[in-house]
Image: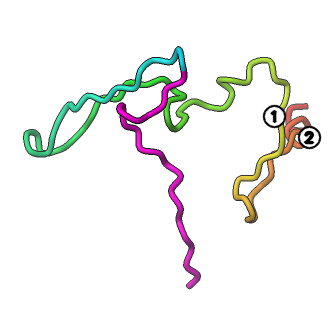
């Protein structure tokens, strides 16, 4: 069996260290329940969609663009599909 290496590209979202773009709402975490008190842990998260890891679709910042800005590959160096401006344009006809 071939072993593959999984690399996490996630960033820790911590209000003390997470960078927020000027003008965006602050990033806040509120503990709602704890394991010790409630038997489970959950937090209420308040953030703009571009805080830390993006949560919104790419289209939120491409108003006015008629096509993608350039090529991208879903799996760099692998057998991923390439999203290219010309392929995108053909699909939209």
Q: Quadrant of residue 44?
A: top left
Residue situated furthest front in the rendering: 17
Q: Relative to 83, is 3 above or below? A: below
- Circles 1 and 2: CB distance less than 8 Å? no
Q: Residue at x 53, y 52 (%)?
A: 9
Tag 1 secondary structure: loop
Q: Position of residue 32 (x, y in %)?
A: 20, 31
Q: Residue at x 76, y 52 (%)?
A: 73
Q: Residue at x 53, y 65 (%)?
A: 6
User: What range is drawn magenta here?
Assistant: 1-21
- Given residues 23 and 39, the one toward you in this image is 23
| Residue wearing tag 1 | 68
Mark 1 is surrounded, within 10 Å at the Cα level, by few (under 14), some (14 to 19) or many (20 or more) other residues, namely some
Q: Relative to 7, is 3 above or below? A: below
Q: Position of residue 8 (x, y in %)?
A: 50, 56
Q: Relative to 81, is 43 above or below? A: above
Mark 2 is surrounded, within 10 Å at the Cα level, by few (under 14), some (14 to 19) or many (20 or more) other residues, namely few
Q: Which mark is residue 36?
A: none
Residue situated furthest left in the rendering: 37
Q: Position of residue 84 (x, y in %)?
A: 85, 44
Q: Quadrant of residue 59?
A: top right
Q: Quadrant of residue 31?
A: top left
Q: Distance between the Cα atoms at labels 1 and 2?
A: 9 Å
Tag 2 secondary structure: helix
Location of the N terminus by quadrant is bottom right
Q: How many marks?
A: 2
| Residue wearing tag 2 | 86
Q: Residue at x 9, y 45 (%)?
A: 36
């Amino acid at each position: 069996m071939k072993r593959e290496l999984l690399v996490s590209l996630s960033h820790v979202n911590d209000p003390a260290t997470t960078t927020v773009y000027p003008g965006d709402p602050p990033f806040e975490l509120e503990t709602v329940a704890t394991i010790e008190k409630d038997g489970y842990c959950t937090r209420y998260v308040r953030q703009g969609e571009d805080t830390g890891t993006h949560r919104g679709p790419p289209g939120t910042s491409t108003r006015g663009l008629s096509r993608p800005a350039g090529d991208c590959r879903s799996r760099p160096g692998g057998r991923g599909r390439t999203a290219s401006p010309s392929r995108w344009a053909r699909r939209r006809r």
